[in-house]
Image (spheres, rainbow, N blue to C red):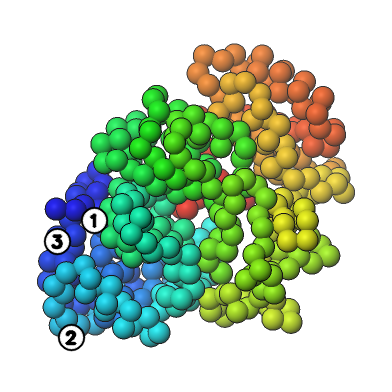
Amino acid sequence: MKIFFHSEKKTKTYEDLIKEINEQKSIKKYIKEKEPYEIIKNLIVSLIYGEKIELIDSEFTKEEIENLGLSEKKLKEKKILEKIEIKNYEQIIKEIEKNKEIWEITLYTSGTTGRPKKVKHKLKTIARSVKKSEENKKNIWGYAYNPTHFAGLQVFFQTLYNKNSIIYIFDMERKKIEETLKKYGVTHISATPTYYRTMLPYIKNEIPNMQKVTTGGEKYDQELEKQLQKIFPNAKIRNVYASTEAGSLFSSKGEIFKISDRMKDKIKINEEKELLIHKSLLGESETFELTNEWYKTGDLVEKIEEKQFKFISRKTEMINIGGYKVNPYEIEKEIKKIEGIKDVIVKARKNKITGNILVALIQIEEKIDKKEKEKEINQKLKQNLQKWKIPRIIKFVETIELTRTGKKVRN
């Protein structure tokens, strides 16, 4: 029997899934579960019955929940379902297609910088990038995202529409990942660059069964791509651009994205070098601020040619150092070139004189002398960067804090 879902805690076949769907008599409007399989199962039930749902991250704090205007009592409210007997996988897809115009999902962005942003999507926007084919039915996915977040939902829909197996590795002990990817013959994986960096030190051998590796959600990292190609020698590596507001929009072989003819009238770059998306590509949200039907993404890009661009940074991540605008990604890129550096994040710290100073939190390999490495880092940065771009404070850390989506925490 074909595996539908596997994690460290449980394994479910498609037959198990259908049995449990048929046993389910009610559904909650607000899906707040810790167990990823339960999130995914309830998501499928909502699709089958055409029920509108809201996904709530299980790690949202009580304060964040209250900021959404929700209560524990409201989260527990259920709706009784009018029984639909599901006989097979094909019927699941058939029922979903019946409801594609009425079904709706609401997502919430992380609330770490204030009130979480509420975004609604129909099937046509959230599953825009799904590719269905006979060839894709052979795929086995390494699921390396939180299933309540947009990127995780992208992988979910790709797997569901092609009857693929989901091998859930997002919360898995990193030392178990290599064995798991090989044991279950995983062919496709999608994750943030930060997730891959936390995984790479534990991969000791090549994994030849991997066919496609996708990275996104953070700035493209050429050095990381080289490392990924070594452990996944037979894989095509792709960089994607997507957002909770608009869904998946671009894919490329490297850092340069091309605007297709289909998208040319819906994407533009303004004078401030910010990427703009036409409202027709967006989900729905009361918080969207449009300027003449265009949505400012907050992403700063560099125009390469008329229809090509590359990501520079988030507008909010640029750091003002004594009047100079500094891109932390540029500094991180230089530090990562130095031997023995596993990962780094550059942040701002308030300063009375310059407004901010730069702080670099750095992970290094074991048995490296920290004092000597700090000297080397400062010497290399002085050679390659202007003085205001050199971190005033270098701190070696065991781990780098991540958000719930697996990205680095910059604020």
Question: Where residue 82 is drawn, which disc sits there?
Answer: 2
In front: 370, or 229? 229
Question: Where residue 4 is drawn, which disc sits there?
Answer: 1
- In the rendered image of this protein, does residue 238 appear above or below residue 124? above
Does the rendering let one see residue 209? yes
The residue lying at 78 percent from left, 56 percent from top is 305
Image position, residue 342 (x, y; %): 55, 28
Q: Which amino acid type is shown beneath numbered disc 3?
A: Glu
Image position, residue 259 (x, y; %): 67, 62
Label 1 vs label 2, nearer the camera: 1
Label 3 vs label 2, nearer the camera: 3
Q: Which amino acid type is shown beneath numbered disc 1?
A: Phe
The residue labelled by disc 3 is 15
Q: Earlier in the sequence, mark 1 or mark 3?
A: 1
Neighbourhood count class around disc 2 (C-alpha, 10 Å): few under 14, some 14–19, many 20 upward: few
Q: Earlier in the sequence, mark 3 or mark 2?
A: 3
Q: Earlier in the sequence, mark 1 or mark 2?
A: 1
Is residue 126 toward the left or the right of residue 187 in the image?
right
C-alpha span from label 1 to label 3? 8 Å
The residue lying at 59 percent from left, 47 percent from top is 253
Of helix, strand and loop, which one carries label 3? Answer: helix
